Amino acid sequence: MKRNRGELFVGLLLILLGAWFVAQRQFPELAKLVEQYAKGPMVLIIGGGVVFVLGALLGTPGLSIPAAIISGIGGIIYYQELVKDPSVWSYMWTLIIGFVGVGNVLAGALNRSSSQVRSGLNTIVVSAVLFIIFATMMGKLAILGAYGPAILLILLGLWVMLRAIFHKGE
């Protein structure tokens, strides 16, 4: 049964999507009501949430990772539309790595796997440092002044080395 959960998920998703299309045809006012929320990035944000909830209900915590990526990209697009600046992708792409980390944290929490949670947190830290470095290099962030990216790279390198030295073999 566990191997078939992914197929069950896809089948359920297709059924729900088909039911949604029928409901829109039968009740046009429902489509108008939802239309205000179903624009651009909100579809991705809500879609990622639906994937997460269905994954949790079906006992497939691994779906937390694509759910976080989908919602996170929706958030980036929402921010891009909010600030009306297409150049945000020049540094915001680094957050996608962090979305993988968020998905790992969620999956680890659902699996009760502390090592997966730690791995996810580590990925989030790396993503945050990369985000700060790229945003600073693109002139969108002025943290730590002109030496910010260099300082962050040094600190990230020290953090990686210390983790390697003090890592408990699991």
Image (tube, helix red, strand yellow):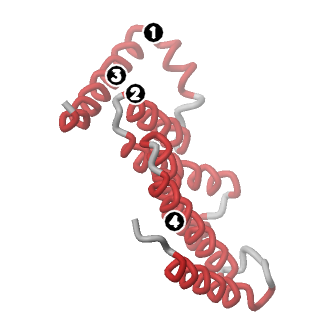
Amino acid on which the number 3 mark rests in the picture = Leu
Amino acid on which the number 1 mark rests in the picture = Phe
- Look at 32% across and 29% down and name the residue there: 13
Query: Where's the N terminus, which quadrant?
Result: top left
Amino acid on which the number 2 mark rests in the picture = Leu
Where does residue 38 sit, x and y in percent of width and height? 52, 33
- Between 116 and 95, the residue placed more toward the observer is 116
Q: Secondary structure at mark 1?
A: loop
Left or right: residue 168 compared with residue 162: left
Q: CA distance from mark 1 to mark 4?
A: 44 Å
Up/down of 21 relative to 49, above or below: above
> Mark 1 = which residue?
27
- Mark 2 or mark 1: name the one nearer the start of the chain: 1
Q: Secondary structure at mark 4?
A: helix
Query: Where's the C terminus, which quadrant?
Result: bottom left
Up/down of 150 relative to 62, above or below: below
> Mark 2 = which residue?
57
> Within the image, what quadrant is residue 3 found in?
top left
Q: Are marks 4 and 2 in contact (CB under 8 Å)?
A: no
Q: Residues within 10 Å of mark 4 (few under 14, many from 20)?
A: some
> Mark 4 = which residue?
123
> Mark 3 = which residue?
16
- Mark 1 or mark 3: name the one nearer the start of the chain: 3
